[in-house]
Image (cartoon, helix red, strand yellow):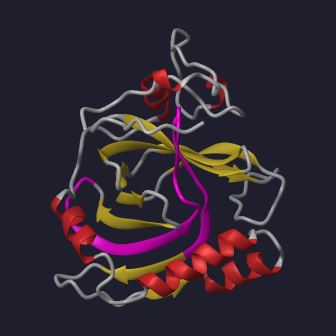
């Protein structure tokens, strides 16, 4: 289920990476902006999220059809994360935790975002371009995890559509001046925006969870009085902004 309604600034929602209709990872995020063109999110250092693990508790990467979700702490960096509508990439800005000090940029190649009652769905395809943060508009991008992407493509894990869109996005975005205006806007908005997002708050705000999860799966204690609708709830459960 998707909808044209938008999330309000400051709302906490869930960024879900999914394979089919099954959750691969679930990250609580704060909405910084949501327009018809793109959604800007904040992932806060220290937030607990659900990540894919094997039976021995080891973190997994794409390529398996067997995993369980377990809580994991986000990295030491805050991230501002721009997801353009109907595009096969996201632009990330890593910041020193709790500050507006930029560390680096990355382009994450992934499934186009789909707005759902619980937040936004996508899937990280494990291919990135990264560049140090600089004072000028030109960046020196380098491709990361290309061998891993080729392996997954060769194994048949990716669809032909995923491969076609990803290759096209890499060719489009590898220039040094890529997304200059978007990067300047993200730098202006850098810094802390409210408390770190947490899963229980995001679930309460959205009023819905993905269909394969329940309140007991959340990595933070949830109130027994928390009202969360099923994933098939109609779009009226969404919080709409004034945009």
Q: At which x and y percent is residue 145?
A: 60, 81
**Camera-side residue: 191 or 107?**
107
Whether residue 119 appears in magenta in the rendering, the answer is yes
Whether residue 143 appears in magenta in the rendering, the answer is no
Seen at 52% across and 76% down, the residue is 128
Q: In the figure, residue 181 lies in which quadrant? A: bottom left
Q: In terms of secondary structure, what is the magenta stretch mainly?
A: strand
Seen at 36% across and 50% down, the residue is 41
**Camera-side residue: 18 or 97?**
18
Residue 227 versus residue 103 in the image, above or below: above
Seen at 49% across and 59% down, the residue is 86
Q: Is residue 144 left or right of residue 161?
A: left
Q: Is residue 145 left or right of residue 74?
A: right
Q: At which x and y percent is residue 49?
A: 54, 44
- Residues in magenta, as a range: 98-127
Q: Is residue 77 shown to the viewer in this render? A: no
Quadrant in which the C terminus appears: top left
């Amino acid at each position: 289920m998707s909808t044209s309604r938008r999330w309000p600034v400051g709302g906490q929602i869930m960024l879900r990476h999914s394979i089919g209709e099954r959750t691969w990872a679930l990250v609580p995020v704060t909405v910084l902006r949501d327009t018809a063109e793109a959604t800007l999110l904040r992932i806060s250092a220290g937030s607990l999220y659900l990540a894919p693990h094997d039976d021995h508790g080891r973190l997994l990467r794409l390529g398996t059809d067997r995993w369980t979700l377990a809580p994991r702490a986000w990295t030491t960096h805050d991230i501002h994360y721009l997801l353009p509508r109907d595009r096969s990439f996201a632009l990330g800005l890593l910041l020193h935790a709790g500050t507006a000090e930029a560390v680096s940029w990355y382009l994450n190649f992934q499934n186009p975002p789909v707005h759902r009652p619980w937040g936004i769905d996508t899937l990280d395809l494990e291919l990135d371009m990264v560049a140090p943060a600089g004072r000028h508009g030109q960046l020196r991008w380098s491709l990361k995890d290309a061998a891993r992407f080729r392996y997954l493509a060769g194994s048949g894990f990716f669809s032909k559509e995923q491969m076609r869109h990803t290759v096209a996005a890499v060719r489009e975005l590898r220039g040094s001046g890529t997304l200059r205006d978007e990067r300047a806007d993200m730098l202006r908005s850098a810094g802390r925006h409210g408390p770190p997002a947490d899963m229980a708050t995001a679930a309460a705000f959205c009023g819905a969870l993905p269909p394969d999860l329940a309140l007991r799966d959340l990595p933070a204690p949830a109130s027994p009085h928390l009202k969360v609708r099923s994933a098939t709830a109609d779009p009226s459960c969404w919080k709409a902004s004034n945009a």
